[in-house]
Image (cartoon, grey):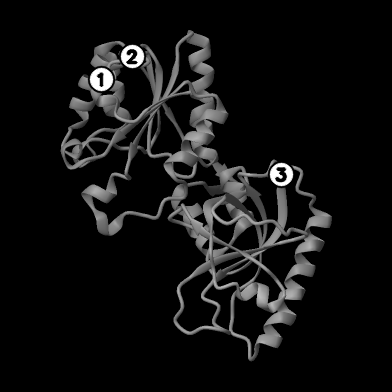
Amino acid sequence: MLVLHDPLRQTDLPRGCVATIGNFDGMHVGHQEIIRGLLARARELGRPSAVITFHPHPLSIVAPDRVPKQILTLAQKEEILRDLGVDALLVIPFTHDFSRWTADRFIDEFLVNALNVAEVHIGSDFCFGAGRGGNLAKLEASGADHGFGVKGVGEVRVRGIRVSSSLIRDAIGKGAMRTVKLGLGRTSFIDGRVATGRKLGRKLGFPTVNVDPSNDLFPGSGVYVTTCHFESFDRSFESVTNIGVRPTLYENYATTIESHIFDFDSNVYGDTVRVYFHRLLRREHQFRSALELTSQIRRDIERSRLYFLKHPILHV
C-alpha cells in the first residue's frame, strides 16, 4: 500500500482513483462497509483505491476541548487498511491553514485537479471543509459538474444498534469488550512498549510486564482476560491484565497497565507488545491486605485459564 503523509504537496498521487474520505477512527464495521464497497468498485472500474484521512483529528485544531481520545494510532489504522487491500492511504496534515479550506476548495484543488477522482464514497452523514460545509449533497453536485461519481454509504447496525466511533469509545471505557468486538468486528487491542516497573507483581509471586501504551484510549480500570503478542515472538501468550492505580498498595498513584503472562519467563523489557482484551473479569477495588489481594489474583488467573479452555485463542 502506498502511504503519503503530505499529499497536498506531492505529485506522485493515485490519479483516477476511487476514493473515500473520513477520519475512520477505530476502523469499525461501518468503516469496513465503506472500504469493501470502495475496493469492489475500484476493481470493477480497473482503478486504484484510495483512502483520504486527516491527522491529527480535526477537532484537535478547531475545538481542542472537544477532541475525543482516538481508538487507533495512525500506524494501526495504516496496518488495518493495508490488510483490507487498499491501494493508497493519503494522510492530510490537519493544520490551522488547512482548517480554513472550504469544501469547494478541497473538491476543486485536491479531488479534481490533484487526484482526478473517478468516484468518491463517503458515509452519508460525513461532513468536511471549513464550517462543515461539505457533505454528500455537495459532493453529488460537484460530481455532476466535474464528471466524477459519488456514493453515500448508510449507517451499519449490529443487533439493532447503530455502530459509531463514539459508541465504541464509550464501550471501551466501560470495559464492555463483547460490545466492542461486535462494533469493531475484531478483538480490541492496544500497542505499547514494555517498561520497567516497580516489580511489585514479582514480589507477590505473579511477575508482570508493564505496558507503556501508544494508544490514547484503553479500557477502563479493572482486570481483563487478555492475550499478549510480542514483536520478538511469533505467537500470542495467554494472560490476565490489570488496568488501574493499585489502590491496595499505593495511594494516588498513576494508572498502570500490567499483564501477568501464563507460563512465560522471558526478558522482554523494551520490546513492543500488543495486548488484546477479551473480557472484563472484575473492576479494580481496594483489598484489606496484600494477602487478600494475592488470593484474588489467583482466582483471576484461574478464571482466565478457564476462559481460554472454553475459547481457545487460535487468532485474534
Q: Secondary structure at mark 3?
A: loop
On residue 48, the disc is none
Residue at numbered disc 2: 148
* Residue 217 appears in the figure: yes
Residue under the point 53% across and 13% down: 43
CA neighbours of label 3 inside 10 A, class few (<14), some (14 to 19), many (20+):
few
CA neighbours of label 2 inside 10 A, class few (<14), some (14 to 19), many (20+):
many
Residue 155 or 176: which is nearer the viewer?
A: 176
Q: Secondary structure at mark 1?
A: helix
**Cα gap from disc 2 to disc 3, whole angstroms:** 46 Å
In the image, residue 11 sits, relative to residue 247, either above or below, namely above
Q: Are marks 1 and 2 in contact (CB under 8 Å)?
A: yes
Q: Residue furthest right?
A: 309
Q: Earlier in the sequence, mark 1 or mark 2?
A: 1
Residue at numbered disc 1: 142
Residue at numbered disc 3: 235
Placement of the C terminus among the 4 image quadrants: top right
Residue 164 image point, x, y percent = 47, 47
| 102 displayed left or right of 154 | left
| 74 displayed left or right of 274 | left
Residue 107 image point, x, y percent = 24, 23
Residue depth check, mark 1 versus mark 3: number of the one nearer the observer: 3
Residue 202 image point, x, y percent = 67, 73
In the image, residue 281 sits, relative to residue 118, either above or below, namely below
Residue 19 image point, x, y percent = 40, 22
User: What amino acid is found at the position of numbered circle 3 in the picture?
Assistant: Arg
